[in-house]
Image: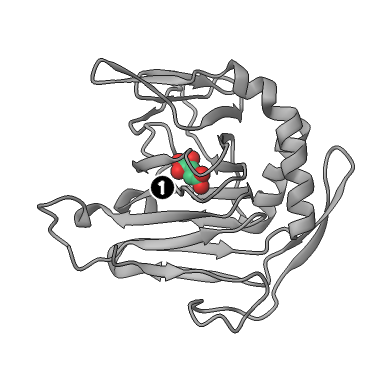
Amino acid sequence: MDTFVLKRKRNDESDADVKDLEPARKRRDFTSSSGESFHLCTDVITRLERPEVGLNVLYYPSFMSLGDSKTVLKQLEETLAPYFDQSPNIVKIGGKTIPIPRQQTAFGDKGLKYSFSGISLNSNAWIPIISSLKSAVEWASGDKFNFVLVNRYKNGDDHIGEHRDDERELDPLGMIASLSFGAERDFVFRHSQSRGKNAKRKDISPVKINLLSGSLLLMRSPTNREWYHSLPVRKGVRDVRINLTFRRMVINDRSTQSILKHD
Ligand SMILES: O=C(O)CCC(=O)C(=O)O
């Protein structure tokens, strides 16, 4: 795949592949609602901005330290196991029943739902660890979120297929904030017009980022309209990864349902 690759080593500003690093900006000590204190850092920022093709992404590789991200992963594993167990583990695509290649759960304001490929996940009420992470992400992004989808990948076989987060109720101008813990995994953006045999824009290369544990990725408008994203299979990866995508849903009385189609 001809990709524009962003790969960085934590705190190694000499990495030649990294574009547009900014000098130190913001740091903050953060006490979670369960009393732990974490150090948040947005000093290092990688900008993936190509306005001519609608790419508008910020990546903070060391938003949380490796130590803190390990602590959070452990807490998430302990706290979320029952939530994952209750969630559907199959989807129906074209009349076929297919196992979902990861575990999922969702938290959010009352009544919000996430639906894809014929199944739907009701949002659970906010719990302390998830609320703390939401506050941390709101601080860094300057945006507000009312819903989070949590994906758990047990190893590199688990994945998410190429898709856009095009839920009907997703605020189209809101950003999506993606927080990762555990195994490093590649995350791939592909422009909507560069896909398939009859692609109109074969000249637009995919963009691949190696998402680190404790990193934060902000997908800002119009990225999600113009680009698909995926977390491909990576056979060599043995460890668990948990990802949280914070979103802002528009709440209205008629419908609180969102629609997504991917494996
Ligand atoms: O796990 C990831 O980094 C991607 C998750 C994702 O694509 C989604 O929640 O829509």
Residue visible at 71% across and 34% down?
77
From the viewer's perspective, tell me whether residue 41 is left or right of residue 164: right
Circle count: 1
Q: Which of the 4 image quarters holds residue 13?
A: bottom right
How far across and how far down the image is residue 259, in percent? 37, 28
Quarter of the image where the C terminus is located:
top left
Residue visible at 61% across and 19% down?
85
| Residue at mark 1 | 232
Q: Which of the 4 image quarters holds residue 109?
A: top right
Quarter of the image where the N terminus is located:
bottom left
Colour option used: one colour
Camera-nearest residue between 214 and 74: 74
Could one spot residue 241 in this view of the protein? yes
From the viewer's perspective, tell me whether residue 46 is left or right of residue 134: left
- In this view, the residue farthest toward the left is 198
Camera-nearest residue between 55 and 13: 13
Residue visible at 39% across and 33% down?
167
Picture layout, residue 29 above or below residue 237? below
Dot 1: element: loop
Q: Residues within 10 Å of mark 1 (few under 14, many from 20)?
A: some
Q: Which of the 4 image quarters holds residue 151?
A: top right
Amino acid type for the residue under numbered disc 1: Pro
Is the residue indicated by label 1 positioned so its CB lies within 8 Å of ligand 1?
no
How far across and how far down the image is residue 22, in percent? 60, 79
Camera-nearest residue between 200 and 2: 2
- In this view, the residue farthest toward the right is 35
Could one spot residue 221 in this view of the protein? no
How far across and how far down the image is residue 132, in percent? 75, 42
Residue visible at 47% across and 33% down?
250
